[in-house]
Image: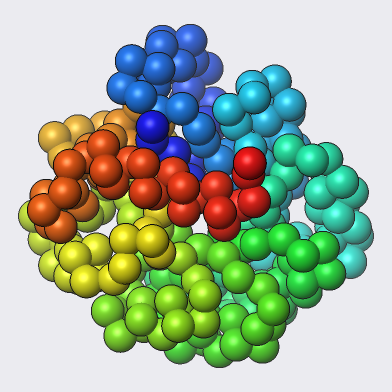
Amino acid sequence: MYFDSHAHLDDTRFQADFDDILARMRQNGVTAMMNIGCDLPSSENSVRMAEKFDWVWAAVGSHPDDADHVDEERIAVYKTLCENPRVKAIGEIGLDYHYEDIPREIQKKAFRMQMQLARELDLPVVVHEREAHEDGLRIVDEFPEVKGVFHCYSGSLEMAKELIRRGWYIGFTGVVTFKNARKAVEVAQSIPLERILIETDCPYMAPEPFRGRRNDPSLVPYVAAKIAALRDLTPEEVGKATSENAKRLFRIS
């Protein structure tokens, strides 16, 4: 019933109790998951996980923190990984201006190179965008054929509407359950349900009442429950709709 559209279940923090997590996912009705690459090793891990479990699909790509490793050789490796039918997206890619460990121009170059790969392969993208709203939207507009999701959305309602007008989706994590998450709440209340994805971004962003702990995909129903409460729906209705949205975006039948 629930589709976790953005997880990093290959993270080493899940090794000790991996089977227990899978059991809790089944118990909580989490039946599908996108495992997202952040660099080459995690992209390869995501593909292996997707090959092992028929309810997991993979995205491959370099996070902005890995942008300084994105060159033609890396793009060629990602292109080869995308030959696997379990790979359904390029990601996570984008811009992060919060810490700026990687210079902005290098981030933008890596983002454009991976958007170009998505255009070439006709794949959707998973975008990480933090404190880079203007540049993020500008680069998206350079590739109008490419669609995807802005995951862990942190922008304004106005920007969300602009993305939706361009055919994009908006992803919400456990942040939407936080007491101070006014912006995320406003967006989750206001945009069309058919443009919403839910995610954990695990092991990060655990929802209330687990905030500050390690997150995992079994907790994505808490995100659905919060959005349901905001929209006067049931968690099951939100789970069904967002699962259909994820399958539509990632072309999963």
**In terms of depth relative to the viewer, which is nearer, 110 or 106?**
110
Q: Position of residue 190 (x, y in %)?
A: 22, 71
Give the residue displayed 45% in from the left and 16% down from the top: 22
Q: Kindly indicate the quadrant of the structure image that contains residue 217.
A: top left
* Residue at 21%, 52% in the rendered image: 227
Q: Is residue 26 left or right of residue 54?
A: left
Q: Against 35, is 51 above or below?
A: above
Residue 30 in sight in this render: yes
Residue drawn at (58%, 27%), measured in percent from left and top? 55
Residue 28 appears at what percent x and percent y?
31, 22
Relative placement, left or right, of 79 versus 57 is: right
Residue 67 figure quarter? bottom right
Color style of the picture:
rainbow
Q: Is residue 36 above or below residue 150?
A: above
Q: How many numbered tags mark residues here?
A: 0
For residue 43, say whether it is visible.
Answer: no
- Give residue 98's position: percent from left, percent from top: 41, 70
Camera-nearest residue between 128 and 41: 128
